[in-house]
Amino acid sequence: MASKLKKLGEGKQIIEYKNNYKIAIVVSEYYLEEINAKLLNACMNILVNNNIKATNIYIEYVPGAFELTAGAQIMFEKYHPDAVITLGCVIKGDTDHDKYINHAVSQGITMLSIQYKKPFIFGLLTPNTMKQALERSGGKHGNKGAEVAEACLKMIDLAHKLK
């Protein structure tokens, strides 16, 4: 969804909601202060601005990006939300660890969506540098947290429309 031509998460109202949708958000503590708190704030702003009640948003933290999948499953089984959003960041380092983590998380989130037939939204930044991460968490490229919140709302709407 991201491109050089589109600023991520511009914050417009997505759709008028008539139901009391519940959303779970799992946030990685790794890079929490630098990146993930900004993603979470932007995500929350979009949800609340689109009539999702703050009391229907459940937020939990996991140690790192690799744990996002397990955290998402635990939260889904506990709260039975209409959707789960995962937020985190893995920055390329001197090794290929980022590729393994990013692949595992993307596959895990996809499998949860299939298993539970609900939207599980992939909000993991996969930049090469801290500068790129900052640009995608409120910098010149917008905020991925807002973008995934928008995607979440659209997927919930699609799921309810096609029931």
Image (cartoon, rainbow, N blue to C red):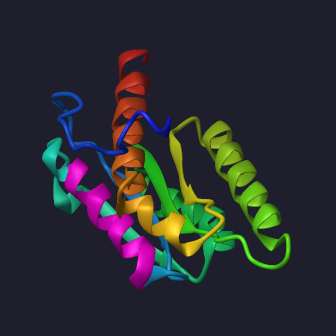
Dominant SS type (magenta) = helix
Give the answer, above or below, for where 135 lies relative to 157: below
Residue 44 is inside the magenta segment: yes
Give the answer, above or below, for where 102 lies relative to 22: below
Q: Is residue 25 left or right of residue 1?
A: left
Looking at this view, is 35 or 117 the one in front?
35
Q: Is residue 101 left or right of residue 22?
A: right
Which quarter of the figure has residue 113? top right
Q: Position of residue 71 (x, y in %)?
A: 57, 68
In the image, farthest residue toward the top: 162
Residue 76 is inside the magenta segment: no
Identify which residue is drawn at 75% across, 49% down: 107
Q: Is residue 15 left or right of residue 74?
A: left
Looking at this view, is 63 or 127 the one in front?
127
Bounds of the magenta segment = 33-47
Identify which residue is drawn at 50% across, 82% down: 29
Q: Position of residue 3 (x, y in %)?
A: 49, 37
Looking at this view, is 42 or 92 the one in front?
92
Identify which residue is drawn at 17% across, 52% down: 48
What number of labels is visible?
0
Which quarter of the figure has residue 136? bottom left
Give the answer, above or below, for where 64 lies relative to 163: below
Identify which residue is drawn at 20% across, 34% down: 19
Q: Position of residue 69 (x, y in %)?
A: 64, 62
Give the answer, above or below, for where 70 lies relative to 63: above
Q: Position of residue 65 (x, y in %)?
A: 62, 71
Which quarter of the figure has residue 152? top left
User: Where's the C terminus, which quadrant?
Assistant: top left
